[in-house]
């Protein structure tokens, strides 16, 4: 296992390039199974989740090959329909294989991924959607089994208590493109990653209308062809760097997602007193002035993304005044709070809201990463803190950020990746 050692207090300056989006790349790997022809994906981020997805596709019978950095070739000539527990349990996103297997083979048996540290992750809306296409769906022995050989177009409403479902929309879309007849997906997720998937599918010959809107209309086709697709830049990584620049920046240029993918984040940054400029595909974040506190509520896109909630909390933790960060998508996604408190942040949890009283400074501490975005929040806090922080369990970070430590180091941060043994024994976790 590795750890990150961060010596806080350095200012960041220079240029960083954002990688392809994890949450677009994973469904794109699944979508590549919808054709027996070769699909070439570009701008794929180098992440442990992506490599894991590649292994699962291999298990399903696909030939998966990594070319030059960022390029993967996938050919699912012959496939089996079962994704077993040993593989699925490590990565929740493997649920998005369900739709592509149903689309391509007319059936699927995919293990339910189980619990997750950010809270319950139900799949009732995925099931409902597939049933609306005439699939029979059963849960047996921890597996979702779908029999969809007699499926036909239908109409499905995917709105739930917390809004739509991103991977549920991806699943239904992938199943629908190869389902005879017309399918209408109402209250479809509008996240940019869903648009990216829809555009990839159209490039393969799918007929989809309403891309980018909450109503997707699909006209099923008999087969899809192979092709090439370039994954869009990661808006969560872009947002993480925007927040890092607001926190400890001295003029940072970020080549990443366009403004329309980040409107709620930009709105909150402006309210906080910082206005990044965008031109020619690049953001320019000036040296951070004195910031003001802002209240944030996470919502489905185009609202403030839950995947940036923890990082925003890190920024507000050192912003003078009181801010309230409310989590509406995953009401238990607050594992970063006790760790940020260990660094001196003044945070109190009230239901699904974190009350943040900005403190003048944080102090470096040994902390424990609990999930992907919480880890990023700890890195941001450590960059700002006085003294040394040790961040443990950084495998969470490597699931979804390509070389975050390397990119930060190039911007001037003092951050190094070390084997866990390099950490002073008294600071490390118990074996
Ligand atoms: N929900 C239901 N029923 C369902 C599905 C979802 O009630 O059948 C609820 C969830 O409990 C949650 C809300 O609906 O409250 C939204 O969940 P959604 O299904 O949209 O989440 P997801 O598709 O499982 C994706 C991202 C997450 C991101 C969420 C929300 C991928 C692979 N994952 O998850 O990304 O937080 O959308 O935007 O796309 C991350 O990257 O760190 C991450 C967790």
Image: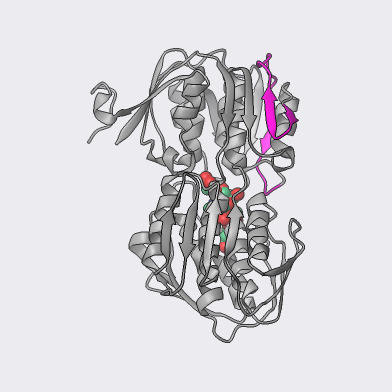
Give the left or right position of residue 259, taking residue 138 as reference.
Answer: right
Q: Is residue 344 visible?
A: no
Q: Nearer the viewer, residue 202 or 169?
A: 202
Q: Quadrant of residue 27?
A: bottom right
- Relative placement, left or right, of 317 versus 144 is right
Marks counted in the figure total 0
Q: Residue at x 26, y 24 (%)?
A: 422
Q: Main secondary structure of the magenta part?
A: loop
Q: Assign the N terminus to one quadrant of the image.
A: top left
Q: Position of residue 11 (x, y in %)?
A: 55, 14
Q: In the rendered view, would you say 267 is above or below 145?
A: above
Q: Residue furthest bottom?
A: 150
Q: Position of residue 113 (x, y in %)?
A: 43, 60
Colour scheme: one colour
Image: 285 above or below 207: above
Q: Quadrant of the C terminus?
A: top left
Residue occupying image coordinates x 61% and y 35%: 238
User: Residue 234, percent across and down?
Assistant: 59, 42
What residue sits 49% from the left and 36% below the top?
Answer: 374
Residue at 46 percent across and 73 percent down: it is: 77
Query: Is residue 353 placed above or below 160 in the rendered structure?
Result: above
Magenta range is 277-301
User: Which quadrant of the structure image shows residue 353?
Assistant: top right
**Within the magenta stretch, is there residue 281?**
yes
Q: Choose between 401 and 370: the one closer to the eye.
A: 401
Can you say whether 356 is above or below 145 in the image? above
Looking at the image, the residue that sits furthest to the front is 68
Give the percent coordinates (x, y) of residue 302.
72, 46
226 left or right of 335 in image:
right
Q: Along the line of sight, which residue is nearer the eye, 274 or 33? A: 33
Q: Is residue 369 magenta?
A: no
């Amino acid at each position: 296992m590795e750890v990150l050692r961060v010596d806080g207090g350095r200012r960041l300056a220079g240029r960083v390039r954002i990688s392809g989006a994890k949450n677009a790349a994973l469904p794109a790997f699944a979508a590549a199974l919808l054709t027996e022809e070769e699909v070439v994906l570009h701008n794929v981020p180098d992440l442990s989740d992506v490599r894991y997805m590649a292994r699962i596709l291999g298990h399903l019978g696909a030939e998966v090959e990594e070319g030059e950095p960022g390029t993967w070739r996938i050919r699912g000539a012959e496939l089996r329909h079962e994704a077993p527990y040993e593989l699925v349990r490590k990565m929740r996103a493997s649920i998005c294989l369900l739709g592509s297997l149903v689309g391509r083979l007319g059936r699927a048996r995919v293990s339910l991924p189980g619990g997750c540290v950010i809270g319950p992750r139900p799949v009732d809306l995925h099931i409902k959607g597939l049933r609306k296409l005439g699939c029979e769906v059963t849960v047996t022995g921890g597996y979702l089994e779908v029999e969809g050989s007699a499926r036909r177009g239908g109409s499905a409403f995917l709105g739930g208590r917390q809004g739509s479902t991103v991977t549920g929309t991806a699943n239904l879309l992938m199943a629908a493109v190869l389902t005879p007849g017309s399918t209408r997906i109402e209250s479809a997720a509008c996240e940019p990653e869903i648009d990216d998937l829809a555009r990839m599918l159209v490039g393969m010959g799918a007929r989809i209308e309403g891309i980018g809107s909450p109503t997707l209309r699909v006209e099923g086709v008999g087969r899809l062809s192979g092709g090439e697709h370039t994954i869009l830049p990661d808006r969560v990584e872009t947002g993480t760097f925007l927040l890092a620049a607001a926190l400890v920046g001295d003029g940072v240029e970020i080549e990443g997602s366009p403004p329309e993918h980040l409107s709620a984040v930009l709105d909150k940054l402006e309210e906080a007193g910082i206005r990044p400029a965008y031109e020619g595909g690049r953001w320019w974040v000036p040296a951070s002035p004195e910031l003001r506190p802002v209240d944030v509520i996470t919502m489905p896109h185009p609202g403030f993304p839950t995947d940036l909630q923890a990082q925003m909390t890190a920024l507000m933790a050192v912003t003078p005044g009181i801010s309230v960060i409310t989590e509406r998508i995953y009401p238990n996604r607050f594992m970063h709070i006790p760790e940020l408190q260990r660094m001196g942040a003044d945070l109190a949890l009230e239901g699904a809201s974190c009350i943040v009283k900005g403190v003048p400074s944080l102090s470096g501490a040994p902390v424990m990463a609990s999930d992907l975005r919480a880890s990023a929040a700890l890195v941001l806090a450590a960059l700002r803190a006085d003294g040394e922080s040790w961040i443990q369990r950084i495998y969470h970070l490597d699931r979804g950020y390509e070389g975050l430590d390397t990119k930060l180091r190039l911007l001037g941060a003092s951050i190094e990746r070390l084997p866990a043994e390099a950490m002073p024994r008294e600071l490390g976790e118990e074996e």
